[in-house]
């Protein structure tokens, strides 16, 4: 029995029965890659900040980006829709951003949509007519037409990868669940600032808003 069925259990689901096997039909499934953009992989100028963020950068370069590239490739091979969401503002001064992106501190982000640092990292660059939605909110559903696009294409299940687990990934997952999409979050294709935050958020959303799985599991769910 795959370990995803018992992993990342919160207090609420410690005793819950194991979920059924997951089968993701190609025509009804989309992969959504959230906010894996150049800006988040730029080195920190401040030595103290560079040290604090070193584990995050190591996870991104060593795990998240290569694993997500493998997941994207598997979906493309099977004809599963690949969609990207990215944080970017439409106005140069960023006045179109939601309040959460204007608050001082880490979440403050002024990222005009055409700047190089706002683009998806080269390793995951969208191809052909793959959809890229631009959001000024944490949730990819709240601030874009993604909900309508998914509905129009007959998508019922969304596989989620990206950053940050506790922010835009979690907000999007909860929104998708509220809209009755089946959601699978690929743990080793996601990251938060720290592993502790990452794991805590996955426990919070697992079994109620999504199923948290590994890359190998997610690819296995895709029908041949």
Image (cartoon, rainbow, N blue to C red):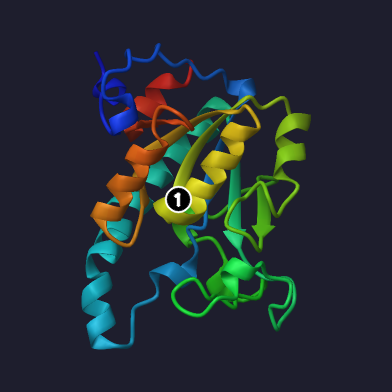
Image quadrant of residue 158?
Answer: top right
In the rendered image, residue 14, in percent from the top left (x then y), is placed at: 26, 24
Residue nearer the viewer, 68 or 56: 56
Query: Element under label 1?
Result: strand
For label 1, the crowd category at 10 Å Cα-Cα, with few meaning under 14, some 14 to 19 and many 20 or more, is many
Residue nearer the viewer, 143 or 161: 143
In the rendered image, which quarter contains the N terminus? top left
Q: In this view, does 138 lie to the left or right of 92?
A: left
What residue do we see at 45% from left, 78% from top?
A: 105
Q: In this view, does 14 lie to the left or right of 161?
A: left
What residue do we see at 31% from left, 59% from top?
A: 61
Q: Can residue 187 be seen in this view?
A: no
Q: Is residue 162 visible?
A: yes
What residue do we see at 30% from left, 88% from top?
A: 46
Q: In this view, does 42 lie to the left or right of 98?
A: left
In the displayed structure, would residue 163 be above or below residue 69?
A: below
Please give the residue where the numbered disc 1 appears in the rendered image: 162
What residue do we see at 37% from left, 53% from top?
A: 65
In the rendered image, residue 67, in percent from the top left (x then y), is placed at: 35, 44
- Number of on-image labels: 1
Residue nearer the viewer, 204 or 48: 204
In the rendered image, residue 142, in percent from the top left (x then y), is placed at: 68, 50
In the displayed structure, would residue 191 be above or below residue 214?
A: below
In the rendered image, residue 95, in percent from the top left (x then y), is placed at: 72, 78
Q: In this view, does 163 lie to the left or right of 48?
A: right
């Amino acid at each position: 029995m795959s370990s995803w069925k018992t992993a990342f259990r919160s207090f609420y689901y410690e005793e819950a029965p194991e979920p059924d096997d997951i089968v993701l039909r190609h025509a009804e499934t989309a992969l959504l890659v959230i906010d894996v953009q150049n800006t988040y992989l730029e080195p920190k100028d401040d030595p103290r900040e560079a040290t604090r963020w070193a584990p995050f950068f190591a996870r991104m370069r060593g795990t998240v980006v290569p694993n997500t590239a493998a997941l994207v490739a598997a979906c493309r091979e099977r004809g599963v829709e690949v969609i990207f969401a990215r944080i970017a503002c439409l106005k140069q001064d960023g006045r179109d951003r939601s309040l959460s992106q204007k608050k001082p501190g880490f979440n403050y982000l002024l990222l005009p949509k055409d700047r190089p640092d706002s683009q998806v990292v080269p390793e995951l660059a969208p191809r052909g007519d793959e959809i890229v939605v631009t959001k000024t909110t944490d949730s990819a559903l709240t601030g874009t037409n993604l909900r309508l696009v998914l509905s129009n294409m007959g998508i019922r299940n969304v596989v989620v990868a990206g950053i940050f687990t506790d922010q835009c990934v979690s907000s999007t997952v909860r929104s998708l669940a509220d809209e009755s999409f089946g959601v699978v979050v690929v743990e080793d294709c996601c990251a938060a600032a720290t592993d502790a935050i990452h794991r805590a958020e996955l426990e919070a959303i697992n079994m109620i808003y999504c199923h948290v799985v590994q890359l190998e599991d997610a690819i296995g769910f895709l029908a041949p």
